[in-house]
Amino acid sequence: MSINVVVNRETTPEARAVDTGTTGLDLFGDDRSIVAMAVNGTTVDLATLVKDGDQISPVLMTSPEGLSIVRHSAAHVTAQAVQEIYPEAKLGIGPPIVDGFYYDFQMAPIGPDELGAIEKKMQAIIKERQRFVRRVVSDQEALHEEANEPFKLELIHDKGGASADDGSSVEVGGGELTIYDNVRRNGDVAWKDLCRGPHVPHTGYINAVALTRTSAAYWRGDQRNQQLQRIYGTAWATRDDLKDYQHRMEEAAKRDHRKLGAELDLFSFHEHVGSGLPLVHPKGGVIKREMEDYVRARHIAEGFQYVGTPHIAKEDLFYTSGHLPYYAEGMFPPLDDDGQAYRLKAMNCPMHNLIFSSRGRSYRELPLRFFEFGTVYRNEKSGVVQGLTRVRSITQDDSHSYCTPEQAPDEVRHLLRFVLSLLRDFGMTDIVLELSTRDEDGKKKDKFIGSDEQWAKATKILSEIADETGLKVVDDPGGAAYYGPKISVQASDAIGRTWQMSTIQYDFNQPERFGLEYVASDGSHQQPVMIHSAKFGSIERFMGVLIEHYAGAFPVWLAPVQVVGIPVASSFNAYLADVLGKLEAHGVRTELDASDDRMQKKIRNAQKQKIPFMLIVGEQDAEAGSVSFRFRDGSQRNGVPIEEAVEFVRDWVASRRNDDPKAPTESPDPVA
RNA sequence: GCCACCUUAGCUCAGUCGGUAGAGCGACGCUCUCGUAAAGCGUAGGUCUGGGGUUCGAUUCCCCAAGGUGGCUCCA
């Protein structure tokens, strides 16, 4: 194996001791390890990197570890630039994160306008190629050196209390305190920061960095603490990588469901309705209806019974369920009707419980599965609503399975398999499971009800079944519902962002609260276990995710308009209308573009609407009794006899396939 | 809920250092009847998000509200 590296032997004493016999190699590190960081340079054999028994770990700048080091170093340069411009700014923490880094400061609020000046200063620091020099200090020295940095002092006292998003401490670690100095060529220390490291050898390694946004963030992520100003940036090994990243962000913005929702006329929001309350337009309605129809049919096939419940109920019901007071702040305030308080429902389970208990239940009926599209209302805080992915009226494809304790594991297994198969039917295949459990270290223990034994048992069942799927399972301690642990399904969209979709929750509390029971085979009264599950989580969110997943180019079966007829001139309208009529007889959704636009313009419009089939007819097709296809990918299939074309489209629509129709590729040279 | 930023025609955006506004697309009308991503000409369309204040005068400056964007916190 060989890597590309560049040399500077003066970085550390350890590095100086290594003579690799090559040029262009930069070594840096600390007492425990020496690291060679590679950039685009000459190729060096790794064997030459071992000297006098020292093992040198090579880090490619483009590797995850290398990028993380580069980003963390970029965070330092950001902080250095900020303190040069705003000397009163106090340092929080500055860890690397996915695709970049941030640094928190206590300072007057800044906005995007200030970022340009900071970036300019950073470029100057980078140009100076200031060396990052690691220094081990005693607690006393650290306290003395960081006397002007109150947040760092707090970290020194706590020895590493602050953690980055990934849970690791970036400031303090390994049992000893270290300070990194940024040293100029002439030996002056330009800046320093309490930091665990490691860092790149010098600031010149940070050659592709950009500040991206500002924000406020609570010190140590706790709402009770003061808010600091956070500056986010992105950094990459090369400028090309940075450009690629920026390009990816632009592409992601293009498929933003909020933008596509307007462009494709799927849904809208109106300030007179309220934040987070979507209005579904006819074309969005088609998608919603197709989703619901399919999901309803699948549920019925899987043994669920379709039920219906009202949107409001007397407040007492939610006290019985425990949602009040546990979930009070997520619910809308009470509606008063002559002294009787009603609430908009924030969940469907209490009402399903009442259907269960409406008559005596036998063990022979179990598992009993109720399902509905229940719209629930959650009073999300003003800052959190976002497009369709975070709304205040949520249509859940909600089901509750009531079963005997013995049946519970199989029911969970059944539900999980069902959920995964449904997601696959919608083209979502990149799936990660999350196991949300009670917070065992007790910080929020009062948020959960039930005995330790119940929790342990339920958690064990879910954990084992999650593992059975062979999918990646991520732990989410403290993320459980108040009544029990849950498995949630995170699906990735086409550009790799993950979204929480489905959820399967094990509930031993509500059956007790509602006094649910069934008569067992021995005549005794027993309490069922209840399993909540939502397959899409919310129809709205899933629709938003689907829009982004397909970038608006829905598979044929979901496309609001499946076929558009485009006449070359208006004299072919009647001919096309006839063809479209044949398709509609098979349930195909069609439109005829009879506008005054040129054919080219109509194609452009259909293309922008991402309609899967364009049927084009001019004189040639009209005379031949045929039509010509143009597919979304731009490919064509011309002169197709009408009957064949109708059959082709009909079959495609009926198949619910998720791939995209296109012209058959030419067979590769049949004669030769 | 917190911080920053944003809100001008249906959409995307100019503009006014305080003197009540403009383009492109879209819509509508007319002409053209055309073979695979934008024909030409014309017309209509705005209490410059809402309310209050400062001012002779506010779309522009200040305050409040609503809605949105990016984060934080939260998310059954």
Image (cartoon, coloured by chain):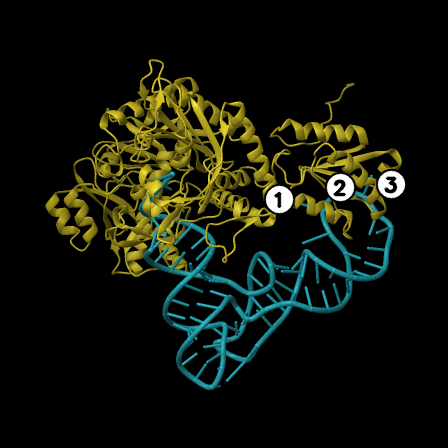
Chain colours: A yellow, B cyan
Three-letter code for the amino acid on which mark 2 is drawn: Gly
| Subunit bearing disc 1 | A
Q: Name the residue rendered at 51%, 25% in the picture.
A: A421
A430 or A88: nearer the viewer: A430
Task: Give the answer, above or below, for where A419 lies relative to A276.
Answer: above
| Subunit bearing disc 2 | A
Horizontal side of residue A130 vs A365, given as left or right = left
Which callout, 2 or 3, points at the residue further toward the start of the chain?
2
Alpha-carbon span between mark 1 and mark 2? 17 Å
Which callout, 1 or 2, points at the residue further toward the start of the chain?
1
Proximity of marks 1 and 3: CB atoms separated by less than 8 Å: no
> Which element carries disc 1, helix, strand or loop?
helix
Q: Mark 3 sits on what residue?
A: A619
Q: Which mark is residue A283?
A: 1
For marks 1 and 3, give the one nearer the viewer. Answer: 1
Alpha-carbon span between mark 2 and mark 3? 15 Å
For the C terminus of chain A, the image quarter is top right
Whether marks 2 and 3 lie on the same chain = yes
A61 or A605: nearer the viewer: A605
Which callout, 1 or 3, points at the residue further toward the start of the chain?
1
Proximity of marks 2 and 3: CB atoms separated by less than 8 Å: no
Three-letter code for the amino acid on which mark 1 is drawn: Lys
